[in-house]
Image (spheres, helix red, strand yellow):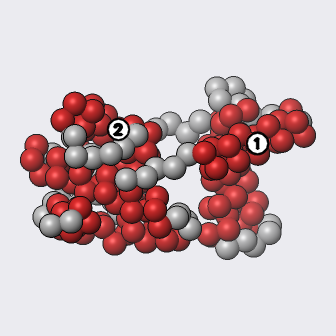
Amino acid sequence: MNSYDQSTAWLHNSPLAPYIDAYKQHFIQESYSPKTSKAYFHYVAHFAYWMTQTNLNIHHVNETTIQEFINGCQSNCASISYTEKCMHAALIHLINILVEEGVSIYPDKKPTLVDEELQAFDDYMNHVKGLAPKTRHQYLYITERLLCEKFSTGAVVISEIMPEDVRQFINHQKELYTTFYCGV
């Protein structure tokens, strides 16, 4: 059995089976590369296998269980080629899908000042500019990264964002997306 067939079998025999289509659709909608999508699918399949082996309740999938799994893979998964960052990213996407589907009891976090600013920006894009949900989502995703980089713990003061801050942010993002590959 090839690794794709094995991954598919692990997923379809796990508590994650009903959410696989939503997971795949997420990557299609967000225009992820097929290679990254395949790698993430593979990581989630390994997580599904681990969930089944450890009898992990799907309602308890959270950051802690993800870290337990990753730590275990570092010492036990000789058959899987991964970087911890890639695996973590794949599983965070899974948590987000489970939260959207109302499955995960992932603890709600208190909104940060960045979250509040993003909500105001989303309201503006929706009610004033009339932008489509997908467009707003993409703008929010990028803006969130910029704001978190600039105002990680303090108040968000838009007037403090200088052109050089934006240039540095864009260059940093460009480096991430041209040198970072999550291959299997």
Q: Residue at x 73, y 32 (%)?
A: 150
* Residue sitting at x 71%, y 67%: 126
Q: Can you say whether 170 is above or below 27 in the image?
A: above
- Residue nearest the observer in this picture, 13 or 153: 13
Q: Position of residue 23 (x, y in %)?
A: 38, 65
Q: Residue at x 62, y 70 (%)?
A: 133
Tell me the element at label 1. helix
Q: Which mark is residue 149?
A: none
The residue that disc 1 covers is 171
Residue carrying label 2: 63
Left or right of 181 in this view: 157: right
Residue depicted at x 21% and y 65%:
2
Note whether residue 88 is visible.
no
Q: Position of residue 89 (x, y in %)?
A: 44, 46
Structural crowding at the residue carrying mark 2, measured as other residues with C-alpha within 10 Å and reported as few (<14), some (14–19) or many (≥20): some
| Horizontal side, residue 80 vs residue 148: left or right | left
Say which label, 1 or 2, has the lower sequence index.
Answer: 2
Answer with left or right where residue 105 lies relative to residue 173: left
Up/down of 167 relative to 36, above or below: above
- Decide: marks 1, 2 in contact (CB < 8 A)? no
**Residue 77 or residue 163, whichever sits in front:** 77
Total labels: the figure holds: 2
What amino acid is labelled 1 in the image? Answer: Asn
Q: Secondary structure at mark 2?
A: helix
Q: Is residue 124 above or below residue 74?
A: below
Quarter of image, res 19: bottom left
